[in-house]
Image: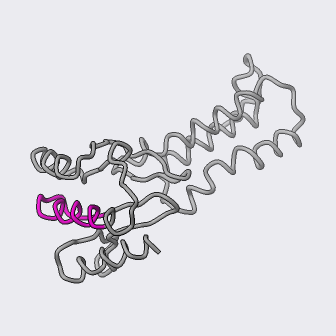
Amino acid sequence: MCVEGLSAIMRRYEEAGLLHGCKVARGAPSISHLLFTDDCYFFFRASQTEAAIMKDILVRYERLSGQVVNYSKSSITFSPNTHEQVKKVVCEKLQVMEIDKPGKYLGMLMCVRKNKMETFVFLSDGIEKKLQGWSNKELPKGGKLLLLKSAAQTIPSFWMSLFLIPVTLCEEMERIMNAFWWGHGQAGKGVRLMA
């Protein structure tokens, strides 16, 4: 019930035009907050005015609910085009620290930057790491096929259902799996195919 109150306060400020959420596309509705079990994400413009409004909302929520925001565990991320002075003012107003790379929350990337190769390189690294443990073992073709389908191909499938992965990264993952299938990297063993 307390979180519903927080959500209502946020909507009221947004409807009054005092708080501006984030839009994922033109014409899409704006998102001012996401609420999870005991975590909250707030989206607003990086300005001293909206930071002050956000702080007032949090103070009001603390007073009404009896729950207290832990500012030492809270952090903020800005869009790349935000000026350093504005970042400093907003961080001071909200009493939170800025983080560059938000990382993951419940296994999901919190931010995807422009350089998708750099963002999703963990997929090819994960496949390579998974297959390296098995590359020196003598496996029959059926065992290799099972390992590729059940272990290696499942690593990127979830992410590929959510994001457009760069083609060059897909080719890299395919290269790693082909090398495992044909036995390359096993002390010179393996079938060398003609182009």
Total residue callouts: 0
Comparing 30 with 165, the one in front is 30
Residue 62 among magenta residues: no
* Residue lying at the far top of the rendered structure: 187
Determine whether, in the image, residue 164 is placed left or right of residue 96.
right
Q: Residue at x 70, y 44 (%)?
A: 152
Secondary structure mainly formed by the magenta segment: helix
Residue 56 among magenta residues: yes
| Residue 57 found in image quarter | bottom left
Determine whether, in the image, residue 114 is placed left or right of residue 161.
left
Q: Residue at x 49, y 63 (%)?
A: 36
Up the image or down, 34 lies above or below 131; here it is below
Comparing 146 with 16, the one in front is 16
Estimate the x, y position of residue 143 in percent, counting from the top left: 87, 40
Q: Give the magenta part as a residue range.
A: 43-60
Estimate the x, y position of residue 156 in percent, counting from the top left: 61, 50
Determine whether, in the image, residue 3 is placed left or right of residue 174.
left
